[in-house]
Structures are given as C-alpha cells and as structure tokens.
Image (cartoon, grey):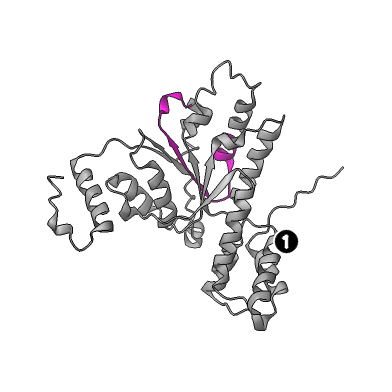
Amino acid sequence: MVIIDFPLPGLTEIQELIRTTVPPERLKIQGLGQEQLIRACQGLTRQRIQRILARALAQKNQVTEKDIDLVLEEKKQYIRQTEILEFYPASATLSSVGGLENLKEWVRQRRNSFGEQAAKYGLPTPKGVLLVGIQGTGKSLSAKAIAQEWRMPLLRLDAGRLFGGIVGESEGRTRQMIQIAEAMAPCVLWLDEIDKAFGGVGGEYSGDSGTSKRVFGGLITWMQEKTKPVFIVATANNVQVLPAELLRKGRFDEIFFLNLPTEPERREIWRVHLERVRPSRIRDFQLDEL
C-alpha cells in the first residue's frame, strides 16, 4: 500500500486556483492586493477557497480587495471548527506595551527575518521565544504585539485542547495542529500557559498512560526540526515545573523573564493607557506621582 499525503495548498497552488476559478475580467484585484489575497487563503482547503471565490462572484459578480476580509472570516471559522487553534486578530503594537525594552528591541531587530531578502542572504528564520513571569506582566500582550509588528497571522493554542479522551486522539490533534500552523506559515503560534499542560511531564508517573509524554515528545521534536517559518511564542508562569528538554537551545531562540515593572516602566504604562483614553489631557496628569 502506498500512502499519499495531500497537504493544504501552497502559494503557487492558491494562485493557480484563483486563476482557474475567477474569470480574468472579474478579478478586480492586482499587484499587492492579489498577493495579500493569496496569503490570506493559506491554511484553507481547496474546496473552501473555491467556495469563498464563488460566493464573492455570486454576490457582486467580481472579486475585489474587500473579499480579503471574507477570506479571513472564513479562516477564523475553519480554525475555530478544529477546536484546537484560535485565530486572533493582532491589534496590539509594540508601542502599546509599557516597558520590556529588551524584548521589544529583540523583536524589532528581527522584523525582516522572514522575507525573501533574508532567505537569499542566508539568515535563519527565528524559531521562537519563551516568556516567563507572574500573571499580569504582559506575556499575552507581547505575543499579540509580536504578530502585529511582523504583520503575521496569530494562532493561539491552548495546550489543554490537544488532549482527547479517545486512544490516539491526542496525538492526532497534535499532528493536525502542526499541519494547520505550517500551512499558514509564516505565522506566529502562541502556546498559552504551556506550564499548565506539560508541567511535571518529566516525572515518573503521569496518570494518563503516557499520553502527555507522547504529545510533548512530538511537539518538541517538531519545534527542533521544523523548516517552515512558524514562530513560537510560549508563555509560562512557573518555569520550574517545565521539563529541561523544553528549555534547551534550538527549541527557543531566547527566554525572557517578565518581572514586575520598574519605576520607569510604570511611568510608561501610565502614559500608554492615558494616551488611549485621554489623549488630549495627558499633560494634566502627574505621571511621576501616579
């Protein structure tokens, strides 16, 4: 028996699919807009892409740049139906993060690491970062800001959703998650509270017949060996419970500890929030006193 794997369509296949589905005189989108449409279709099956294009043609007899939002909404629904990943609209920017200058500088330096020029030059694409700190120090906000700074889609994985009650279901969900993330590459994969799912997995007794160990082993092997530009942002509150093999170089480029804000950082946090709600009156407030 020959096993043939049918991956989700890549950029070239999506471009050909659009060309064969939409008549040239009805494709009212060219250049950068068409490139954005093709990238927006990444991660969807051929049938879903054809259905979106057919719906756009049925509604207004043409495909325009406004249909990119239609594709993104369909992608949200598709990812939500998997019950594993969530598609997050990245609205936060680095300027909306108060403090954390080391992390923000690291992100800015690698802004163009996923482009064609970086690949031609031979620069390796960043693999990911681990953000560790107590609750409320800006880990989730930083993950959203990274996706917005690099203008990449943000996928959030609640690691607890990988585990199912049927034998082999957890391993299958892990493979499905990897397939979707790689099909949408380049993208940012946000592993939220990874310590809750895999904390203590290195212990002798896990109580689940080794399911968590197999899922964890498959995940870290993919993190080490992946070739697609999927940037991982993992967040954790308690680094002490994480297995040592997760923290070694090669899985993450850097580990950042997000501490309680210092006095200059607290001033910056006040400024960010006041500019959001009272932009014209920020000079009326004594930031140092606050």
Kind of residue indicated by mark 1: Gln
Q: Residue at x 33, y 37 (%)?
A: 258
Q: Where is residue 215 shown, x and y percent of the image?
A: 62, 32
Label 1, secondary structure: give it.
helix
Q: Residue at x 71, y 31 (%)?
A: 166
Depth check: give the residue in front, 151 or 66.
Answer: 66
Instruction: Give yes or no for residue 224 being in the magenta stretch.
Output: yes
Asked if residue 190 lies left or right of residue 177, the reply is: left
Q: Where is residue 18 shown, x and y percent of the image?
A: 67, 71
Q: Residue furthest top?
A: 204
Depth check: give the residue in front, 220 or 184.
Answer: 184
Instruction: Give yes or no for residue 288 being in the magenta stretch.
Output: no
Magenta region: 220-242
Depth check: give the residue in front, 120 or 103.
Answer: 103
* Mark 1 closeness class: few <14, some 14–19, many ≥20 residues within 10 Å: few
Q: Where is residue 194 shown, x and y percent of the image?
A: 49, 34
Depth check: give the residue in front, 172 or 67.
Answer: 67
Q: Residue at x 60, y 26 (%)?
A: 213
Q: From the viewer's perspective, is residue 242 above or below residue 221?
A: above
Task: Give the residue number, with chain letter if any, for mark 1.
Answer: 47
